[in-house]
Amino acid sequence: MSFLKSFPPPGPAEGLLRQQPDTEAVLNGKGLGTGTLYIAESRLSWLDGSGLGFSLEYPTISLHALSRDRSDCLGEHLYVMVNAKFEEESKEPVADEEEEDSDDDVEPITEFRFVPSDKSALEAMFTAMCECQALHPDPEDEDSDDYDGEEYDVEAHEQGQGDIPTFYTYEEGLSHLTAEGQATLERLEGMLSQSVSSQYNMAGVRTEDSIRDYEDGMEVDATPTVAGQFEDADVDH
Amino acid sequence: MMRKKTPTLREIQWGQRETEKLDLRALLCQASFGRLFYSFFKSLVGKDVVVELKNDLSICGTLHSVDQYLNIKLTDISVTDPEKYPHMLSVKNCFIRGSVVRYVQLPADEVDTQLLQDAARKEALQQKQ
């Protein structure tokens, strides 16, 4: 397979969580041989005995699972579905947004199976992959609270103990505001400085102190004078 | 961080012309709505759901757990199109990356839609104040 290449095995610097020797790799049903699977925080890698192998980036891993069917010809194994194409002729996996062929409206799917000789290791391999996946939230994900930095403990936050990551993301985003966004920010900050009189507690656990500290344009719309107030969201209260 | 995104619930409510103004609020409320849905999914742990991925694969299973990024762990899974994905037939438990989920189909009688709407509206109002 020409996409195999030689690279040094991941070590502690890459956040290696688990390495599993004597593990066969199977790509879309085709065996690649036996080697070592490296589950690191940075990426998932597999290297065969001659030092050739490949790496998978966690954001491209759609799902992973344990197959427990002993009657399967491979036996119990770790199944990994990747959102990329691995062509035999190409050197590297092609992410779907780089594809130019007519199938570009179809998400590419590649199925890997990692078959360790030590079946008792499967649970730990699965868990290690779960942990690593959680370290790579998709920055495009509109629903995520993600920000550069440490884990965001939602429960601690709900209890009012955590930092508020949105402040981090806000400050990072400050430099990306358009001119109109900047004008909006200034207007909101102006309103804020006039009307920060009531302390309020919301799910974001924002206090007056935190507002002043971060100046996040947290508007306190005491009166609906701002154009475009969302009347439809105004319910009786 | 600022990023291109598909319309959020709030944008749909307020209209696209408000998007600039909403950039700040959207940032702030995204976090809250993310939390809202995280809490919502947590309340569904143990229920049977069908997760449809962006690659069109649909997986039926019991919701085992969910994290803040809406990564989903399912147990006792079955694939709705086993002919296309025969390798998943023997899979019992799986971890699905949150960002590849297109839809999560929920049992209608398990979801208090009114409650969810009220919670979302309340969240939106608190953002406004």
Image (cartoon, rainbow, N blue to C red):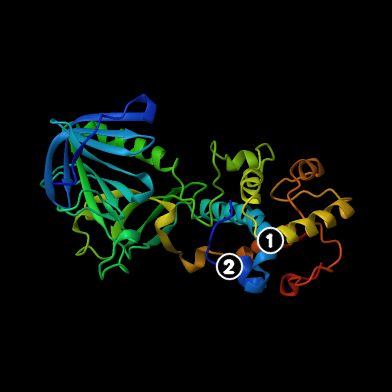
Q: Quadrant of the C terminus of chain B?
A: bottom right
Provide the residue designation for mark 2: B113
> In the image, what residue occupies the spot 51% across and 54% down?
B41
Q: Is residue A34 left or right of residue A209?
A: left
Which of the 4 quarters of the picture holds residue A124?
Answer: top left
Foreground tag (1 vs 2): 1
Q: Is A7 left or right of B50, judged from the image as shown?
A: left
Q: Is residue B26 above or below residue B12?
A: above
Q: Residues within 10 Å of mark 2 (few under 14, many from 20)?
A: few
Q: Is residue B118 visible?
A: no
Q: Nearer the viewer, residue A133 or B24?
A: B24
Task: For mark 2, give the secondary structure.
Answer: helix
Q: Quadrant of residue A205?
A: top right
Q: Foreground residue, A225 or B125? A: A225
Alpha carbon distance from label 1 to label 2: 39 Å
Q: Which residue is mark 1?
A: A179
- Which chain does tag 2 point to? B
Q: Is residue A109 above or below residue A230?
A: above
Q: What residue is rendered at 32% in x and 69% in y?
A: A105
